[in-house]
Image (cartoon, rainbow, N blue to C red):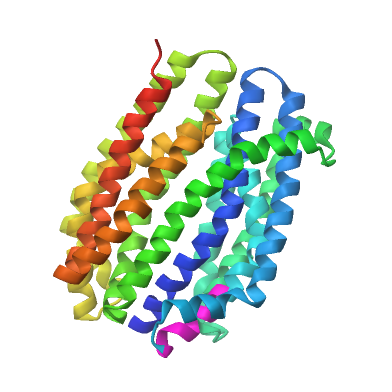
Amino acid sequence: MGTEALAALGIAHAALMVVMTLGMGMAVGTLAGVARSIGARRPGDAAAVFGQGVLISLVTGTGLALSALFVPPWIMAFMGAEPAVAQPATDYLAVGLLGQLVGAPLMVVTFALQGAGEANAALKVSAVSPIVNAALDPIFIFTLGLGMPGAAWATNTALAVTLGVGVWVVRRGDLNLVVRRSGFRPDREVAAGILRIGVPGTLEHTVRTVASFSLVKLLTAFGAIVLSAYTSVMVLLMTLILPGIALGQATASLVGQNLGAEQPRRAWRTAWTSAGLYAAFMVVLGLALVFAAAPLVRAFDDNPAVVAEGARLVRVLATCLPFIALALVLSKAFGGAGDTLPAMATAATAHLLFQIPAVYFLGSAFGPTGAYWGMAGAFIVHGLLSAGVFVRRFRPD
């Protein structure tokens, strides 16, 4: 659809991720509670946590969907993008916010499956959305002629289908006995436990996404070419991050279950083994990404200026990939342990206190390349801080 459309997607997605974090934190709280209860062999408690998590997610998703009526124009006015970029971004964001009506409970369902040790079931559920989305995108965007809103409607439809599959999997799997016992009746005490873990978890993800949103705001000053290159590279980077998210969720489940079973040393070994595996993965695939950067960016936007800018960004970000691995896995491990405040603090330090000033000053002095190095530096700081705090908080005696 062109450079402007890809730049619009970058702005809209950055804004959408900020509001989606409200549902993410509650899902983390649900996972931690389910994992600990399963590890302690208390299925009734796991049932109660899951039921309250679903109820909270429905309330959160409804609120996010209602925000579609007034939030998108405010955000685009703040971003100050050129009209050719701002209008499609507004349209995409409005439809994307409506999708959180099903997106928020879907996160709770998949996280609860992981917390209960149903990793294969969670994988099958999670695989549905990208497959359906990929199939529907060309139909909604081009065949039906909906353009950017069509991409968002394809995503919403995929989320709804995936939620249906998730409910079906829960009812057929081992977690079904847990669901039957829960009854989904409001329980203030259990809900408070989820919020106690989920609110700091929400703040951690909010810090990350607000920092990304602020970063896009700063990059907007460099024009559509830089924004399009950034969007393309972020899609490529997510292909490396998604396996880490899956590994981090598995790590969170195992850490929570081991702590629930009073096995702190095994929880410690699990976290560091996962972090080491993912860091090695990032080094190898990061090198491959550097060599293939130009053709990969060209697959999204064949504008020569965008390809050159995207390749430059890939080379800079390749230096910080192992540190992204450390931060991602260890932050999930904090969540599985039910201790989300340290993860929030390290994310805030790296991505708000460090990244935004670094990107601003380096971007002002050295242009887009300076801004890219500010981004990379923030990921390095985040990884080192996460490792240091995790050692301090969880190292066995």
Q: Nearer the viewer, residue 302 or 80?
A: 80
Q: Is residue 315 left or right of residue 383?
A: left
Residue 387: where, in percent of width, then height?
33, 32
Q: Is residue 352 left or right of residue 303?
A: right
Quadrant of residue 211 within the rendered picture: bottom left
Whether residue 153 appears in this view of the structure is: no
Q: Is residue 80 above or below residue 65?
A: below
Quadrant of residue 34 within the rendered picture: top right
Q: Nearer the viewer, residue 378 or 27?
A: 378
Magenta segment main secondary structure: helix
Q: Is residue 305 left or right of residue 199?
A: left
Q: Residue furthest bottom?
A: 83
Query: Which residue sits at x=43%, y=41%?
Result: 345
| Span of residues in magenta | 83-93
- Indicate whether residue 329 is drawn in magenta: no
Whether residue 170 appears in this view of the structure is: yes
